[in-house]
Image (tube, rainbow, N blue to C red):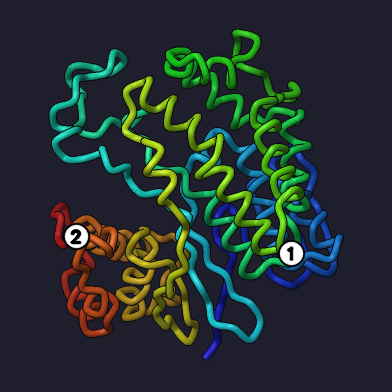
Amino acid sequence: MNWRNSIVGCLWILPCCTVIAQPTMFPPVRGTHEMIAAANNFEVEAGYRILSAGGNAVDAGVAAILAASVTEQARFGLGGEMPLLIKMQSKPVIAISGLGTAPAMATVEAYRDRKPESWEKPDRIAPIPGQGIKSAILPGVLSGLLLALELHGTKSFAEVVAPAIEYADGFPMGEEFSAFIRNNQQILELWPASRQFFLPSGAPPLRGEIFREPTLASTLRAMARVEKKARGNRARKIRAVHDYFYVGDIAKQIAAHSEANGGYIRYDDLRKFRAETDAPRSVTYRGYEVFKPGFWTQGPVMLQALSILEGYDLRSLKHNSPEYLHILVEAMKLAFADRDRHYGDPKFSKIPEQTLLSREYAQQRRGLIDLARASLEHRP
C-alpha cells in the first residue's frame, strides 16, 4: 500500500527537488534538497531559512505558517483556524486541531436575540453574522502551531518566528492582498483597529508598496522574549509562549476588546483553550491511503467523495470533459450533503463516522448518481 502525507495549513513539505509556480511579481524558488509549497515566496523563504539552519519539516512548516499570518492577512491570520496533518518518519500520521471553538456566550439564544449590526442589510440578516466581532471564534492557529513545534519540532519559537517578524516590519504588498483591502474598504473603515491596520495612510496600499504591521511585529517579538526568559526545558519555554497569548496580557486585551465592542469572547474562554491532537481519518483510493483531519473539519468530504469516485473509470474519460466533471461534481454534492447533516464538533455531535467512510455506504451513494442528469436535490 502506498501512502501520501502532508503538512496542511497553507503548506506542504516533502523531500524532493523544487519547482514552485508563483505570480509574475514573484520569482520561482528552486532547490535540490527539500520542497516547500506555499501561497507566496515569503512563506517559502521562511520555511527554507529554517531548513537551511538545520530545522526539520515541522520547524519549517511552523515558520512558513507564521509568515503567512503576516503576508496573507487577506485570508489567513493568527485569529483564524488551522487543521494540521503531520507525518514524521517511522511514526503514524497525526492531526492537530488548530481550530478555535465558539465562546461560551455564543449560544443559540444570543444569536437569535441579537440586534442587527449597522452594516447589515435589512433583507440579508443571518442568525450568525458573516462578519464582525460576533462571528469570531477563539483564535486557534497559534495554539496549534505551538503544539506541533513542541511535539515534533526541534527549533525554538524565537527561531521559527524570526522571518515573520521581519515581514511584519515591512514587505512588498501583493496584488491579492491589495485587492482584498480595496474591495472591503467600506467594511474595514467601520472599526478603528481594522482601519489603522489595513489603511494606515487612509487609502488602500498599492501593489508593490511596502506594507508594515508594527503592532503585529511588536506582539510576535514579545512572545519571542517570553520564551527566552522562561525557565525550564524547550517544551516548558514553548508552553510559556502559549500561556502569554492565551492566559496573559494578550488574552486580557482580546477579552477586553471583545466585551467593549459587543463580542462574545471572554477571558475564561481563552484561558481554557488549548489545541489538541487527534487521529486523522483515511480511506484507500486506488492503492493510496489518503489522510484528512477528522469530522471537526470539512476534510472527510474529500474522503467520502474519493470513495464514491473509486467506482468509476475516470481514466477512460477525457480530463475535465463534461462527463468527467459531471461525475466529480455529483460525488462532491453527495459528500457535502452529508457534511451539512452529520459533521460537527465530536464533543457535542454524534457522528456516524464508520458508516460515512465505509465502502458499503460509498457504493450506496454512488447509486444515486445519474450519469445523464445533474441532481438539484440536497441528499444527505
**Marking on residue 373:** 2
Tell which circle, 2 or 1, labels the residue nearer the N-terminal end.
1
Image coordinates for residue 68, horizontal then vertical, percent: 63, 44
Examine the rendered structure and indicate whether residue 14 appears above or below residue 205: below
Examine the rendered structure and indicate whether residue 62 appears above or below residue 115: below
**Marking on residue 211:** none
Image quarter in which the C terminus is found: bottom left
* Residue visible at 32% across and 71% down in the picture: 304
Quarter location, residue 14: bottom right
Question: Is 70 or 278 nearer to us in this picture?
Answer: 278
Image coordinates for residue 13, horizontal then vertical, percent: 67, 65
Question: Is 239 or 331 nearer to us in this picture?
Answer: 239
Image coordinates for residue 47, horizontal then vertical, percent: 74, 55
Examine the rendered structure and indicate whether residue 264 appears above or below residue 343: above
Is disc 2 placed on a helix, strand or loop? loop
* Residue visible at 45% across and 67% down in the picture: 318
Q: Residue furthest top?
A: 202
Q: Are marks 2 and 1 in contact (CB under 8 Å)?
A: no
Q: Distance between the residues labelled 2 and 1?
A: 42 Å
- Left or right of 198 in this view: 207: right
Q: Which residue lies furthest to the bottom in this view?
A: 1
Q: Which residue lies furthest to the front in this view?
A: 231
* Residue visible at 75% across and 48% down in the picture: 229
* Residue marked by disc 1: 35
Q: Which amino acid does label 1 sit on?
A: Met
- Left or right of 218 in this view: 291: left
Question: Is 121 or 229 nearer to us in this picture?
Answer: 229
Quarter location, residue 361: bottom left
Q: Is residue 41 visible?
A: no
Q: Can residue 236 be seen in this view?
A: yes
